[in-house]
Each structure stands twice: as structure tokens, then as C-alpha cells.
Image: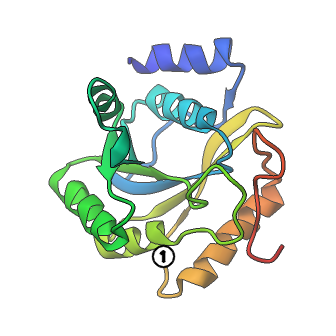
Amino acid sequence: MKPATAHKILTRWMHWTPLKSQLPPEPKLILLGVPHSSIWDFVVAWLYYRSLGGKPRVMIKKDFFFWPLGALLRSLGAIPVDRKKPVGITRQVIDAMEKSEQFALCIAPEGTRKPVKRWKTGFHTIAKAAGVPVYVGYFDWGKKEISYGWRMECSDDSMADLRKIQQYYKEKGVQPKHPGCLAYLDD
């Protein structure tokens, strides 16, 4: 899909407001997407990143990669992963990132669309191992705004970094599509 088409669908048909109009400058990065409470989060975020001219990559469990859905998912930038082997997921994503000139991995740190108390830190592990920055992105269903926020270099303390990230989202007041699906460490 061309960037102009993605932008038109996002803004005119879905009534979303993109707050940034350029891709992050790094060719390889991780972009967090919060809050994740609906499959529509993927649609909105994918359209947004395509409207900027980027090609987002997402991890999807390998069970969905059957014919013909598998071909469609790959064309949308999906990477099949076996969630039963978390260490293998990290290595698989890092290998794919190293083989590509440009690679924007979009991750929902909640790990699921259901409410969770503990966010996953796999994004942090991948970012540290691959030496790429993390951008703190969001889709606010209350305001219908989407953007990526600040750029973060991961420290050696994943929990401290996670608390900073969650504080950013709390202060921003982002609203999920389905209320009650956003939980933080300190709640």
C-alpha cells in the first residue's frame, strides 16, 4: 500500500490524527505500541507507519501462518514466532534485523490484548542485543491520535526502563479501545 493511500484511510475514513509526519531517523529500531486492547490497534498502527513511508514488522504466533493467511501476513511484515520458545524468538528477530537494511519492529509490551499486570521485557532484550533504540509509540482511542514519542536507549536495568516507559503512558493518559485493558506495574 502506498503511503498516501494509507494516510487517506487513516485520516479520512477512520478519523485518526497522526501527530508526526516523518519516520524516526534510524533504519533499525523497535517501536512500542500501547495500549494494546484490540486487533484494530494493529490496523491503525500499521496504516500510520505505512503513511510515513515505513514498512512495519510485527511478531505473530506461527499458528496463523497457514495458506493463504500466511502469505498475506508476510506481505504485511509479519514474522512467524513460536511463543513456546521465548529465547528462540529473540534470536530469530535479531537475526532478521541483522539481515535487513531497514527493520522497524513494532511490539506491544503487554504481550496480549487482555489486561495484564506484568508487561513483557522482550523488546528490551532485543533492543540491547541488536543495539537499536526503542521509540515509545501510542494510539490513543479517546483522542484518536497516533504517534511515536521519545527515543529511549535501553539501560542495563530493564525494570527501571519499563517503569519510565509506563510513567510516560500514564502521564500521557492514553486510552485503549476497550477500557480496563491497560494496567501498569504500580497499579
Q: Give the x, y percent position of residue 25.
A: 40, 49
Q: Residue at x 44, y 29 (%)?
A: 50
- Per the image, label 1 sits on a secondary structure element best described as loop
Give left or right: position of 51 versus 78. right
Residue 73: x and y, percent?
34, 32
| Residue 19 rendering spot, x and y as whole percentages | 66, 36
Classify 15 as above or below 121.
Answer: above
Residue 112 position (above or below residue 152): above
Residue marked by disc 1:
154
* Residue nearest the observer in this picture, 134 or 179: 179
Q: Count the marks: how many? A: 1
* Rendered position, 13 above or below 145: above
Residue 164 lies, in percent from the top left, at 67, 74
In the image, what residue occupies the spot 62% across and 32% down?
40
Front one among 89 and 69: 69
Q: Quadrant of residue 118?
A: bottom right
